[in-house]
Amino acid sequence: MLDRLAPLTAWLDRWGRLPVFGVVLALAGALLVLTSGLPTARENEMLRVRAEKAEAAARAAPAAAAGSVVRQEEFDAFFARPERETDWLNKIHALATAQGIAINQATYSATAEPTLKLMRYQVTLPVQGTYPQVRRFAGSLLNEIPVLALESVTFERKQPTDRLVDAQLKLTLFVPAGR
């Protein structure tokens, strides 16, 4: 085995170890540069394909715009209901009463959504009841009021042994603007 390494050791002795180490390091660097360019070429190809798809979609957009008029009409028809804001708020109160939950106070704020032709009524309801009561109340709100969105529910129990929880429901009611 040592006989096979004799020419290599003679060559290293002739040139010195430092220049040979420099050549090996340069070759390793060149190999690293060549292999690191392969993923970049693959990424460039994927980006080119995505750009072609985006251009094709942009060319097809005028045809799809005709279909969006129908979707806008369906959207507007969903929110165009005979109930007014006060009707929906009365419904919220009736559902709370049906679940045995008392609403002592509520905060309301209205915001116009001109691009959607809707008014957004944000309602915050602090309620108190058992956990199942509050869950049933939130579920009945979503089932009975189709133009209502439940944004968040927070529960708080003052003591671990308390039967009742304090909950805060943040709701958004969407109604057509300009009524």
Image (tube, helix red, strand yellow):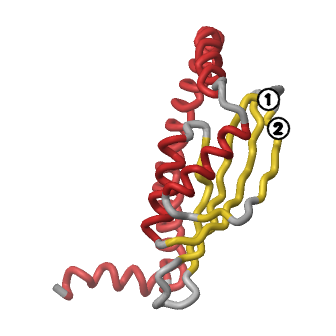
Instruction: Indicate which label's residue lies in the foreground, 2 or 1.
Output: 1
Q: Are marks 2 and 1 in contact (CB under 8 Å)?
A: yes
Q: For the residues marked 2 and 1, what is the alpha-carbon distance in whole angstroms?
A: 7 Å
Quadrant assignment for the C terminus: top right
The image shows residue 66 at horizontal and vertical percentages of: 63, 9
Q: Residue at x 48, y 90 (%)?
A: 160
Amino acid type, label 2: Ala
Q: Position of residue 12 (x, y in %)?
A: 42, 83
Q: Name the residue tied to disc 1.
A: 177
Among the 4 quarters of the image, the one containing residue 4: bottom left
Nearest the viewer among 108 and 98 is 98
Q: In which quadrant of the rendered image does the N terminus lie?
A: bottom left
Tell me if residue 59 can be seen.
no
Residue occupied by mark 2: 112
Label 1 SS? loop
Three-letter amino acid code at the position of disc 1: Ala
